[in-house]
Amino acid sequence: MTKENQKTHRDVIRSVAIFVSNLSFEGDFKKQPMYLQEIFELLLDTEFANDLILRQKMLSCLKTSRDLVKVLSQFTDKQIQKACDNVTMVKAV
């Protein structure tokens, strides 16, 4: 059995919780969609960004970022941090 196959859904949840928790320490993650949009708009003005596949990827990134913010916006940063801390302490079965 490979190491990847030994991971459980709890390992995935723990990793996501750590990721979300770390986001709150790297600036205001709730502004990330706006930052991405600004970057993408500047890129789209270049010849480099004149690529349909690249544009689709940019839109996908924006949607994912917006969805994350939408889900977490109802909570304070402190609540998110506390929840993530609790999840990361859960031991895999």
Image: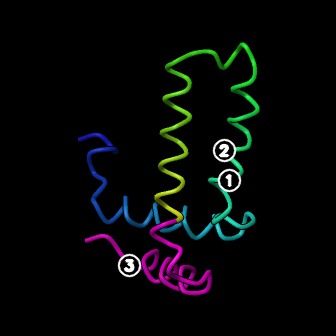
Nearest to the observer: residue 85 or residue 23: 23
Pointer 3: what residue? Answer: 90
Tell me which amino acid carries mark 1.
Met
Secondary structure type for disc 2: helix
Nearest to the observer: residue 81 or residue 50: 50
Tell me which residue sits at (51%, 31%) in the image.
57
Pointer 2: what residue? Answer: 37
Which residues, given as a range, are shown in magenta?
70-93
The reply to whether callout 2 and callout 3 are in contact (CB within 8 Å) is no
How far separated are the C-alphas under marks 1 and 3?
Answer: 33 Å
Tell me which amino acid carries mark 3.
Val
Residue 20: give x, y in percent of width and height: 54, 66
Pointer 1: what residue? Answer: 34
Instruction: Say whether residue 74 is magenta.
Output: yes
Tell me which residue sits at (49%, 29%) in the image.
56
Secondary structure type for disc 3: loop
Tell me which residue sits at (34%, 45%) in the image.
3
Question: Which is more foreground, mark 1 or mark 3?
Answer: 1
Query: Does residue 37 sit above or below 88 in this rendering?
Result: above
Instruction: Say whether residue 35 is magenta.
Output: no
Query: Does residue 89 sit above or below 20 in this rendering?
Result: below
Residue 5: give x, y in percent of width and height: 26, 45
**Image quarter in which the N terminus is found:** top left
How far separated are the C-alphas under marks 2 and 3?
Answer: 36 Å
Nearest to the observer: residue 56 or residue 80: 56
Tell me which amino acid carries mark 2.
Gln
